[in-house]
Image (spheres, rainbow, N blue to C red):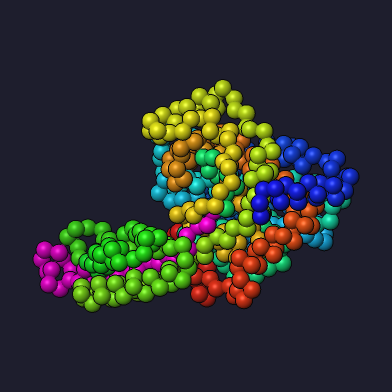
């Protein structure tokens, strides 16, 4: 859909919006929730709970929603920390996604200089505390707008655990929890404001576990069979395999267990692998080559190996008419206003990002619409193949900040990040209002979605029929 066609569609819809709906300002509904946004974001940031272990973070969101009159379905899809919250009657049904898991192995205070917190094993380096709080705010603001205007429709907040390597949304999609939604709105923290049509990479991960025979490494080495040798042999073969894969392929791994003492031949070792590609079928084709490398490594080192698929995500399926609409909504918003103290804090962060870091003023810009391929992966991909999904990113981090960095942790716990979160909530609410009141856009977007997905589409996850790996972060 071209810009001129989209704007004509939005203009026509504005004439059809009921008078009551035109008189209620949805942005004011978001502004009324800014204290809650900041408080909830900070509480989840402090908790920094890992995937499928986010009991208190999930519970905090549920408590806030119950206070606002949402009906809650807890523990959906066999996941204790997943939930669905809904308010309203009739249709359309518009869902929002809320993440809240942290990343292991990184932590930071909200200081603008490197300041790890002693004893803390995780941090919100991808800003999922902001993600959850922003979606909560948007859901409540949409509820209040629906109530005030009498507009028919339901707003639904999906509490989606374990995005970081746990594929919580995939299990929820597999359970059919998105099948009766008309649209889903998604957002993510970032270092800029954008509603690009972004296609992510498909990925699958697995833990390869080698078992050998322990022995004294000096006194009786001939009796030992090193499980670590098996892991290292597999890693060597996979690294040679990289030369013979297509350009879009990404393979990465860590050794999660390799032994405890050099003088003990380790009888257990484990490698955790990710495989990514823009085409889900290519991931499926690459995976047996990893399995073959694991089998060969075990044969060559006299060990045994087994493996467990941990997570798998399909690529996102952008709907251009929705992304163009979201770009237009994002550009309607006044830029965030920062205090002198916040700007000073941000300037200190910028000094840690290198000389070529973007200017702080870029946090106020909205990127022009474009179609792009990102090299990350997300379980939003499976949601976007179940229901038309529109996404937005806002500047919650200092321009130039990378996700999964200590700078992202710091901003995600600071008022700087909370203000960017409010901006995301405003964009999501404006998009929701447009979808509730614009039947022509709904029809166009659904037709585009069906055409992009294919008339004969049958959903297939990259996880098979396995149950959620609720212990993968323990």
Residue beneath the point at 23% across and 77% down:
299
Please state the horizontal and vertical placement of residue 233, each as a whole percent of the image: 23, 67
Residue beneath the point at 41% across and 29% down:
351
Please state the horizontal and vertical placement of residue 345, each as a whole percent of the image: 50, 27
Question: Could one spot residue 11 in this view of the protein?
Answer: yes
Q: Quadrant of the C terminus?
A: bottom left
Q: Quadrant of the N terminus?
A: bottom right
Say above or below: 400 vs 49.
above
Say above or below: 314 vs 369.
below
Q: Is residue 188 left or right of residue 96?
A: left
Q: Is residue 461 magenta?
A: no
For the view shown, which residue lies furthest in the top direction?
A: 340
Q: Is residue 463 left or right of residue 238?
A: right
Residue beneath the point at 19% across and 63% down:
264
Q: Toward the viewer: 156 or 120? A: 156
Please state the horizontal and vertical placement of residue 339, each as a whole percent of the image: 59, 25
Q: Toward the viewer: 148 or 322? A: 322
Please state the horizontal and vertical placement of residue 327, each as a whole percent of the image: 64, 45
- Which portion, as a residue range, is magenta? 198-226
Question: Could one spot residue 74 in this view of the protein?
Answer: no
Q: Is residue 217 magenta?
A: yes
Q: Is residue 257 left or right of residue 470?
A: left
Say above or below: 183 vs 398.
below
For the view shown, which residue lies furthest in the left direction?
A: 219
Q: Is residue 89 left or right of residue 119?
A: right
Where residue 424 sits, quadrant-wise, is top right
């Amino acid at each position: 859909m071209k810009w001129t066609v989209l704007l004509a569609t939005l203009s026509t819809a504005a004439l059809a919006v009921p008078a009551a709906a035109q008189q209620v300002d949805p942005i004011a509904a978001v502004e009324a929730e800014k204290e809650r946004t900041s408080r909830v974001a900070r509480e989840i940031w402090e908790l920094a709970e890992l995937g499928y272990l986010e009991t208190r973070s999930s519970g905090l969101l549920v408590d806030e929603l119950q206070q606002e009159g949402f009906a809650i379905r807890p523990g959906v899809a066999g996941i204790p920390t997943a939930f669905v919250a809904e308010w309203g009657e009739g249709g359309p049904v518009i869902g929002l996604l809320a993440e809240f898991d942290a990343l292991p192995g990184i932590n930071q205070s909200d200081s603008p200089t490197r300041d790890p917190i002693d004893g803390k094993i995780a941090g919100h380096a991808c800003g999922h505390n902001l993600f959850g709080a922003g979606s909560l705010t948007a859901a409540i603001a949409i509820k209040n707008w629906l109530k005030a205007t009498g507009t028919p429709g339901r707003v639904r907040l999906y509490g989606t655990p374990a995005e970081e390597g746990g594929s919580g949304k995939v299990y929820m999609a597999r359970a059919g929890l998105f099948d009766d939604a008309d649209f889903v709105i998604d957002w993510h923290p970032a270092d800029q404001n954008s509603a690009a049509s972004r296609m992510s990479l498909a990925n699958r991960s697995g833990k390869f576990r080698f078992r050998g025979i322990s022995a004294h490494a000096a006194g009786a080495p001939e009796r030992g069979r090193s499980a670590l040798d098996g892991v290292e042999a597999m890693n060597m073969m996979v690294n040679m395999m990289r030369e013979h894969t297509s350009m879009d392929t990404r393979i990465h791994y860590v050794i999660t267990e390799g032994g405890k003492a050099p003088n003990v031949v380790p009888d257990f070792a484990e490698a955790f692998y990710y495989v990514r590609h823009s085409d889900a079928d290519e991931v499926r084709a690459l995976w047996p080559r990893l399995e073959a490398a694991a089998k060969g490594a075990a044969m060559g080192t006299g060990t045994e190996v087994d493996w467990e698929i941990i997570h798998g995500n399909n690529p996102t399926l952008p709907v251009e008419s929705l992304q163009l609409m979201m770009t237009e909504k994002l550009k309607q918003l006044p830029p965030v206003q920062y205090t002198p103290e916040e700007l000073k804090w941000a300037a200190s962060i910028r000094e840690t990002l290198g000389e070529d870091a973007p200017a702080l003023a870029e946090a106020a810009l909205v990127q022009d619409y474009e179609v792009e391929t990102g090299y990350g992966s997300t379980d939003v991909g499976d949601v976007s193949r179940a229901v038309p999904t529109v996404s937005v990113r806002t500047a919650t981090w200092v321009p130039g900040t990378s996700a999964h960095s200590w700078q992202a942790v710091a901003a995600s716990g600071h008022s700087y990040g909370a203000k960017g979160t409010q901006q995301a909530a405003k964009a999501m609410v404006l998009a929701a209002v447009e979808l509730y009141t614009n039947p022509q856009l709904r029809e166009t977007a659904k037709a585009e979605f069906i055409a992009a997905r294919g008339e004969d589409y049958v959903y297939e996850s990259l996880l098979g029929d396995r149950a959620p790996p609720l212990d993968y972060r323990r």
